[in-house]
Amino acid sequence: MINSQLTILQQAQAYLKATTSSQYTQIIHPLFISSAGAHMRHILDHYRAIITGMDDGFIDYDKRSRGGDSELNPNSALAEIEQIKTFLLSLSKSQLKMAMQLSTEISVTEKQVEVVNTTLARELIFAGSHAIHHFAMIEQIAKAQNKATPQQFGIAPATATFLRSEKCAH
């Protein structure tokens, strides 16, 4: 489980090392309403919410740092990823089973917050899946910039398995 998270973060690192600050912050109108940096910062916000939530067993994904250095500077995002990797490598199996509560808004028409029971492992699985889906958006931004991205960037694990089985079938 931790290794899968590290692989996801390594993909982010590969993208960040290969991008320029101008590519990272560019918003390509009218196709996109946000930059690759905004997507990356949003991904990191979720991991940060999990790390912060460890102290009191309460994760709030709605507390975000919109803007900020990790959204504007690929090197800041790289530094934050290193901190997240250190956190992940410090986790024990018993911590992964740790019961937590999750708070999140669930409505776009009015403020409605739900609090549900969860575990640290479940939320890390969510953060990884969430990251992959945002990588898919970053992939599209990169294509519009005529920029290459890491292999399997934005590909969900189940999709990767399907693609491997299709390759073997032919």
Image (cartoon, helix red, strand yellow):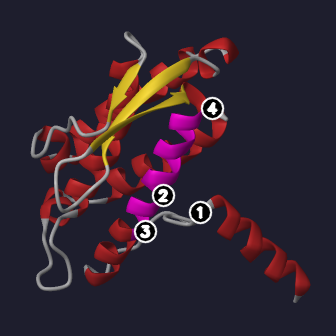
Residue where numbered disc 1 is placed: 156
- Where does the N terminus fall, quadrant-wise? top right
Residue 137 versus residue 120: which sits nearer the camera?
Answer: 120
Residue range of the region highlighted in magenta in the rendering = 122-136
- Which mark, residue 132? 2
Residue where numbered disc 3 is placed: 136
Q: Is residue 71 left or right of residue 149?
A: left
Asked which quadrant contains residue 110, the reply is bottom left
Residue at 13 percent across and 39 percent down: it is 69
Which comes before the other along the chain, label 2 or label 1? 2
Q: Is residue 65 left or right of residue 123?
A: left
Mark 2 is surrounded, within 10 Å at the Cα level, by few (under 14), some (14 to 19) or many (20 or more) other residues, namely many
Which comes before the other along the chain, label 4 or label 3? 4
Asked which quadrant contains residue 30, the reply is bottom left
How far from the left and from the top, in percent, is residue 98? Answer: 58, 17
- Label 4 sits on what residue type? Ile
Q: Is residue 40 visible?
A: yes
